[in-house]
């Protein structure tokens, strides 16, 4: 019986792979490409705009965020330092926490900041993947770790997320009024989580998990290869009352329903990433940061200390033209 089930599972898996067909998506246009100078650790992993300020974080630096000064070509990163208090105890298993701690000690960036967002009150929120924790930096510079719902990690792990080293939380965005906050689990399984601010604390109202999914895909950068990689989320953004996900492997941006996480429409930037001078040695892509406005999508690239085809090693920001009809197009 067990053998029969196993064989059936393998046949089903084979059928799924064989039936995989690339979906033709509208390609976004590159308006500008901006190298970022001044990020001593490189590795731009989060990007947002708070009022008139562009802000970024690096997953290799625990004591600073960066204020970005746009230029005609390169942008200049100016550090804004802070002191994070001791990280609260994590609900992740001991073995997973230790693997993450050891890896980050070797590469640098024990807190592993992967995303940044802000609210209308001037609070900045930094997502620590290593500790599945959120650091809030107030307008005065006061730092504190947010008290997250006890059930957040438990529900995520029960749905198949947050089970693997270096595949934990990757994306963060908060509503401008601070009422809702979304998190993206990176891969194996990837998914979306949501919390609500109610009665002075963050709660999982109706459950934390919006969606969770597995799946393997070819990389658009290696279309002739049979190798497949896990689908992933790189970051999240809000615009026009909708949630947008940056999907690194598939080189696309997707609009999603904020209450269910359901995919509504996607646009691709794979043609840009496949440009002869822009090809990067990592086939799963380097797009890790996302911010949207009416006219553009701003995508931050984490170079992971590797040069692309033209030798460029600095972090990069791509400005992509909004699709015809805007981000709310049917």
Image (tube, helix red, strand yellow):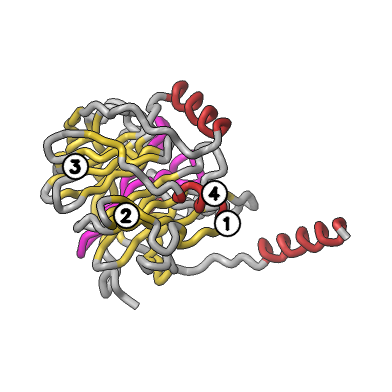
Q: Is residue 188 magenta?
A: no
Instruction: Name the residue that disc number 1 marks.
Output: 214
- Label disc, if present, on residue 73 of the rendered structure: 3
- Circles 1 and 3, Cβ within 8 Å, touching? The answer is no
Quadrant of the rendering where the C terminus is positioned: bottom left
> Residue drawn 12% across and 51% down?
51
**Residue 319 vs residue 265, the one in the foreground:** 265
Looking at the rendered structure, the secondary structure element under dot 4 is: helix
Label pair 2/3, CB-CB below 8 angstroms:
no
Residue that carries the numbered disc 4 in the rendered image? 157
Gap in Å between the C-alphas at discs 4 and 2?
A: 19 Å
Residue mark closest to the camera, 4 vs 1: 4
What separation in Å lies between label 4 and label 1 (alpha carbons)? 13 Å
Span colored in magenta: 279-308
Mark 4 or mark 1: name the one nearer the start of the chain.
Answer: 4
**Which quarter of the image is occupied by the N terminus?**
bottom right
Q: In the image, which is nearer the foreground, mark 1 or mark 3?
A: 1
Measure how far apart labels 1 and 3 are at the Cα level: 39 Å
Q: Which residue is mark 2?
A: 181
Mark 3 neighbour class, 10 Å CA radius: few under 14, some 14 to 19, many 20 or more? few
Residue lying at 56% horizontally and 41% vertically, measured from the top left: 164
Picture quadrant where residue 39 is located: top left
Secondary structure at badge 2 equals strand
Q: What separation in Å lies between label 2 and label 3 (alpha carbons)?
A: 33 Å
The answer to whether mark 2 and mark 1 are in CB contact below 8 A is no
What is the x, y in percent for residue 22? 54, 65
Residue 231 sits above or below residue 85 on the image: below
> Mark 4 to mark 3: distance in Å?
43 Å
| Disc 2 residue crowd, few under 14, some 14–19, many 20+, Cα 10 Å | some
């Amino acid at each position: 019986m067990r053998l029969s089930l196993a064989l059936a599972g393998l046949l089903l898996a084979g059928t799924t792979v064989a039936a995989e067909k690339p979906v033709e998506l509208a390609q976004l246009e590159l308006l500008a490409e901006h190298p970022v100078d001044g990020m001593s650790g490189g590795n731009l992993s989060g990007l947002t705009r708070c009022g008139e300020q562009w802000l970024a974080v690096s997953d290799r630096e625990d004591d600073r965020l960066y204020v970005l000064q746009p230029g005609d070509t390169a942008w200049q990163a100016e550090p804004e330092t802070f002191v994070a208090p001791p990280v609260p105890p994590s609900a992740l298993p001991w073995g997973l926490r230790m693997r993450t701690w050891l890896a980050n000690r070797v590469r640098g960036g024990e807190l592993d900041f992967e995303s940044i967002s802000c609210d209308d009150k001037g609070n900045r929120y930094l997502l620590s993947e290593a500790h599945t924790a959120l650091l809030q930096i107030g307008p005065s510079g006061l730092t504190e770790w947010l008290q997250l719902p006890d059930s957040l990690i438990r529900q995520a792990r029960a749905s198949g997320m947050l089970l693997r080293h270096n595949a934990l939380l990757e994306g963060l965005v908060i509503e401008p009024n601070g009422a809702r906050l979304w998190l993206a689990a990176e891969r194996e399984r990837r998914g979306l989580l949501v919390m609500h601010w109610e009665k002075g604390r963050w709660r999982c109202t109706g459950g934390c998990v919006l969606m969770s999914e597995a799946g393997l895909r070819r990389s658009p950068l290696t279309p002739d290869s049979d190798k497949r990689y896990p689908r992933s989320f790189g970051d999240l953004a809000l615009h026009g009352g909708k949630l947008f996900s940056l999907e690194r492997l598939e080189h696309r941006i997707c609009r999603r329903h904020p209450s269910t996480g359901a995919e509504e429409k996607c646009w691709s930037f794979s043609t840009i990433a496949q440009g002869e001078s822009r090809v990067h040695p990592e086939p799963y892509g380097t797009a890790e940061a996302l911010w949207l406005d009416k006219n553009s999508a701003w995508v931050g690239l984490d170079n992971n200390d590797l040069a692309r085809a033209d030798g460029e090693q600095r972090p990069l920001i791509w400005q992509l033209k909004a699709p015809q009809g805007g981000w709310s197009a049917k």
